[in-house]
Image (cartoon, grey):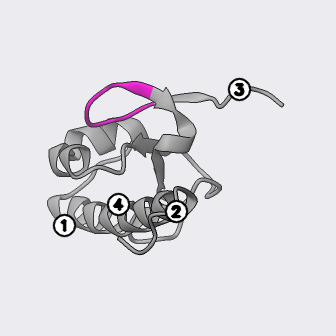
Amino acid sequence: MGADPRRTCIACRTADPASGLVRLAWPAGTGQPVVDRLAPGRGAWLHPTESCIGALRPGDLARALRRTVSPDELGGAIAACRAASAAHNAAAGSRCGLSGL
C-alpha cells in the first residue's frame, strides 16, 4: 500500500500526512463549507488543533478554495473545524486506548 499523501495546512503552512489533517470543502449549492475528505470540489487542509483553527483567516480559506469568504462564512468554517477536531481527537484517543480520558 502507498504512503500517506502529504498536505499543507492552510493556517500554519506546514506539510504533514493527510491522515493528520481535516479537509474543508465547499460543495456547489451549499451555503457553508463542510469537513469531508470526499466532498466534491476544491478542498483546504487544516490541522485539527486549536492553534491552527484559531489562526485561520478569511484570506487563507479564500485562496485555497478560490472564492470569496465573508467573516460569517469563516465563522461557519471554524465551527465545522472545531467539531471535526473534537471527533478527530476522540478517534485518536480511542485508537490509543485513551477514550476514557
At horizontal 35% and vertical 25% (from top left) the residue drawn is 14
Q: Which of pointers 2 and 4 indicates the residue nearer the eye?
A: 2
Amino acid type for the residue under numbered disc 4: Cys
- Quarter-of-image position of residue 4: top right
**Mark 3 vs 1, N-terminal side:** 3
Between residue 67 and residue 74, name the one nearer to us.
74
Does 84 sit above or below residue 42? below
Is residue 24 a member of the stretch shown in magenta?
Answer: no
Per the image, the residue denoted by label 4 is: 81
Q: Which of pointers 3 and 2 indicates the residue nearer the eye?
A: 2
1 vs 79, left or right, is right
At horizontal 52% and vertical 69% (from top left) the residue drawn is 29
Q: Gap between marks 1 and 4, in whole Å? A: 14 Å
Q: Which residues are magenta?
A: 8-15
Q: Which mark is residue 72?
A: 1
Q: Quadrant of the C terminus?
A: bottom left
